[in-house]
Amino acid sequence: MRSYVVSSLVITALWLAACAGPRALSPAEREPLVRESARRQPLPDEVERAAGRLAALTLADQPDTAAEILAAIQEHDAGLEAQGERPSGLSDNGLDLLNSLDGTSSYPERAQQLLERRDIDPVLRRRLERYLESQPLRVAERRLREDRVRKLGSIFNQLVAPVSRFFIGGAVPTIESGRAAIASLLLMHSFPEATTQERQALRAYQEFLERHPDAPESEWVAEEIARYKRKLHRQLHGQALEAAERAMKAGHPDAALAHLDRADRLVPNDRRAASLRVRAKWEQERRNVAIQRSLGAREVVGIPLDLETAAEFEQLALAVLKAPPDQVARHAAAWEDRHDSGPLWGEVRFLQTYWYLAHNEEDEFFRAMKEVAGLDPRRSTMARHARWLINDPEQNPHAFYRAARRADRRQRAGWILLGRHARGPTRRGLPWPLEWILSLPGFATSLVTMPVRLLQYPGTRPHFGGGVLHAGERYLARFPEGQHAEEVHRELEGLYAIRGRWGQALEHHRARAHPDPKRVATYRERIAERTLDAAELHRRLDVRAAIYRSVLNEYSDTPQAERARSELKELVLNASPQRIRLSKEFLREYPELWAPGALGLRSELLDGEEENGEMADEGITLLGRTWVRISLVGKEPVVEEVPREDFARFIAALEEVSYRRLVTDERERPEPDPQRDLFFERARLGLLDEADVRPSARSEAVFLSTAEKHGRIRRTESILPVEIVLQGGLEDFGLAAFPRVRLPRETPDAFLYR
C-alpha cells in the first residue's frame, strides 16, 4: 500500500512538472508554411466577357453598341439582386466608362449623378470624388470660401477672448477688450490686398479658361480673372514701392531703381513711383560723382628725406608689410627715437601698439589703441583706423564678449521680471505712447507673476546665453592663448553643459589650465551615451555599426563600451538584406496575403488559440530574397523560404492591397520608400536569386492594419465651424471658455502663391 502511494505521488509530480515546463512545438509552429498550390482562378463568365467588349467598344468610340452591352450587364446584376445574390459590381464602372465618351463638358455632371448611388464601388467613388474636387471652378470656389472664413474668423478670434473676459468684470478685462478691438482693426488693415487663397483662385480660373474657352461660364470667369489680376498688381506694386523706399534708406539707389522698374511694369505712371525715381537718380548721380572724385589723384603731404632717412623709411615700410608684429613695433620705436615723427607721428604710435599684441597682452594693446583713436582726425588719419579696429568684433572680440554677457544678464533679468513683455510693448503700428498705454495691463500682470518664473528659471536656462557662446568662440578663435582664455573657457563650458552639448563642454574643459579628471570622465560617459542613442536613429546598418565601433575605440574606458559591444554583436547576428515587416493584425485584415499560393501560412497561427500555436504581434518580416521570419508567441522565431512563384504572387497582392487602401481611405498618405519598391519590383520579376546586401538597399518598411495605424475609432471632423476653447493662466488671473472659429488649413502648395 505504501509503495502504491509513493508511486502515485511520483507520477503526479512528474505530470505537474511536465505541465509546468515549456510547451512543445505544435505542428503549425514546426511547419508554419503549407506547401499548397494556388487555387485556379475561375474562368471569366459571360458578364466579365461583356465588360471586356464594353471597354473595347468605348475605346473604338462606339457609344450606341457599348450602351446596349451596359444595359445587358445592368439587367444581369438586377437579376442577381432579385435572387438575393451578390451582383457583379461591373455596372457602375461600365457606366463611368460610357460617361467618359461624352467629353469633359458633361462628364462632371454625370460623375455627380453616379456618386449619388449607394452601391458604387469604393475605389470608383474615391476616384470620382477626387476628380470633382480637382475641377478648376470648384477649386476656385473652395479657396475663396476659405479666404472669407480666414478673414472673418481671424477677427472674431481676436475679439472673442477679451470680450468674454469683459463680461466677467474688472478693470484689466475692460482694458484688454479695448486693446483687442484696436488689434482687430489693425488685423483688418494688415490683410494683403490679394491673399494667398485669392491667388490660388485666380490660377484656377485661368486654368478653366484655358481648358474651356467656349464654355458658358467663360464670360464671368474672364471678369473674375481681370478683377483679381488688378488686385494682385496693386499689391505687388505696393510691395515694389516699399522695397524701393527701404533700398533708398539703406543707401542703395541702384536697387531702388530696379524695384521702381518692376513697379512701373505693374502700374504705369504712378506719382509716388515717379517721385521716388527722381530721388533715386539724384542719389545715384551724387554717388557716381563721389566715386569719380575718390578715384582721382590726391595730394600727398610731402616728407623731405635724405638718402639715409629714405632707406630707413623703406625698411619701416617693408617691416609693416612682411615682419611679425613685435618687429614692426621695434622698427616704429627706432624710427621715433631717431627722427622727429612729424606727419608720421600717428602712424608710428599706431605701429608701436603691436608690441602688446605680439606678447598676448590684448588689454594693453586696445588701451594703447584707444589713445591713438583719441587723436585729432584732422591731423592723423590713423585715428579712424584705430576706431575701426576697436569697433570690429573680429579684432576686438573680448569687448564684444563682455557686451554679450551684459546683454544676456539683462535678458535673464527682464524675463524674470516681465516675462514675454520684457522686450517692451507689442509693435502695432500705433504711436508709441498709445502702445505703452495698451501694454500697461500686461506689464502689471507680469510683475505679479514673477515668483512663478523664478521657479521656472532652472528649466529655461538653456534658452539663454546664445550670444555669449558666439562671442566667446570668436574670442578664442582670435586669441587662443589670450589673457582671458581661462575665463572664457570656464563660461562656455558651463553654458554647453547646461544645453547638454557634452562634446563642446569637454573641449573647453580640457583647454583650461587645470582640467578635472573626474569631470572629463563624466563628460566622456555622457558623450558615449548620446552617441549610442543617436545610433538607434540610423536606418543603415553600416552607419550604426560604424558608430558602435567608434564608441568601442574612443570610449573603451566608459561603461557605455559594454553596451556598444552587445548592440554591435546583436546587429551582426540579426543583420539581413531586408527588414520589411507585416504585423499580425495586418495579415488578419487581408487574408489573401497568407492564403495558399501566396505566403501559405497555416490558419492556426492566426486563429487566436495559443494551444495550437499563435503568431506574435510582430507578424512576419521579409529578410531578403524569398526568406521570411515568422514571430511566434513564447517561442523563437522561425525562418522559412517561400517558393519563388508564391513569393511573387504575395508581393503583387501586397502592392494591390496598399494601392486599394490608398484610393479608398482618405486618411492614407503615400509613404515613399525607394528601397522597398525596388525589392518588390525585383520580387515580381523573379530576380531575387541573389540578395542585394548593400546597406543602402535595405528597407525597414512596416505594414500595419487600419486599426493599428489610425485607431479603432474612426475620427471624424466636426461639422460645426467653431470649437470651444478653455484659456487662462497666471498671466491673466483666470480661466475663460469661449468659442473660436476653426480656420481652414493652407493647402500644401500655398507657398507657391505667396
Image: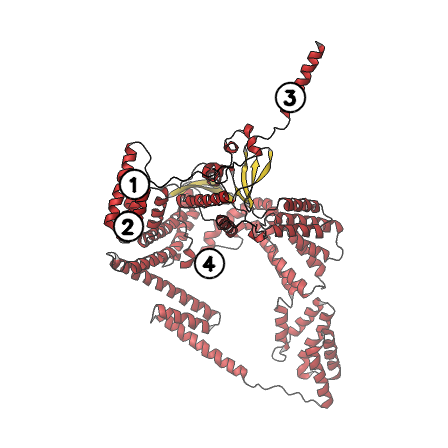
| 450 w.r.t. 209: above or below | above
Task: Give 531 or 296, whichever is nearer the viewer.
Answer: 531
Question: According to the image, label 4 marks what residue?
Answer: 432
Question: Residue 16 got which mark?
Answer: 3
| Residue 578 makes an appearance in the image | yes
Q: Earlier in the sequence, mark 1 or mark 3?
A: 3
**What residue appears at the point 53 percent right and 55 percent down from the top-left corner?**
423
| Residue 754 makes an appearance in the image | no
Return the x and y of residue 716 as percentages of the image width and height.
40, 40
Q: Residues within 10 Å of mark 2 (few under 14, many from 20)?
A: some
Q: Nearer the viewer, mark 4 or mark 2?
A: 2
Spatial separation of the CA atoms under disc 2 and disc 1: 25 Å
Q: Earlier in the sequence, mark 3 or mark 4?
A: 3
Q: Nearer the viewer, mark 3 or mark 4?
A: 3
Pointers 2 and 3 in contact (C-beta within 8 Å): no
Spatial separation of the CA atoms under disc 3 and disc 4: 88 Å
Question: According to the image, label 1 marks what residue?
Answer: 117
Element on which disc 1 rests: loop
Question: Residue 57 got which mark?
Answer: 2
Spatial separation of the CA atoms under disc 1 and disc 3: 64 Å
Disc 3 residue type?
Leu
Spatial separation of the CA atoms under disc 4 and disc 2: 77 Å
Disc 4 residue type?
Trp
Disc 1 residue type?
Arg
Q: Earlier in the sequence, mark 1 or mark 4?
A: 1
Task: Give 159 or 622, whichever is nearer the viewer.
Answer: 622
Q: Earlier in the sequence, mark 2 or mark 1?
A: 2
Pointers 1 and 3 in contact (C-beta within 8 Å): no
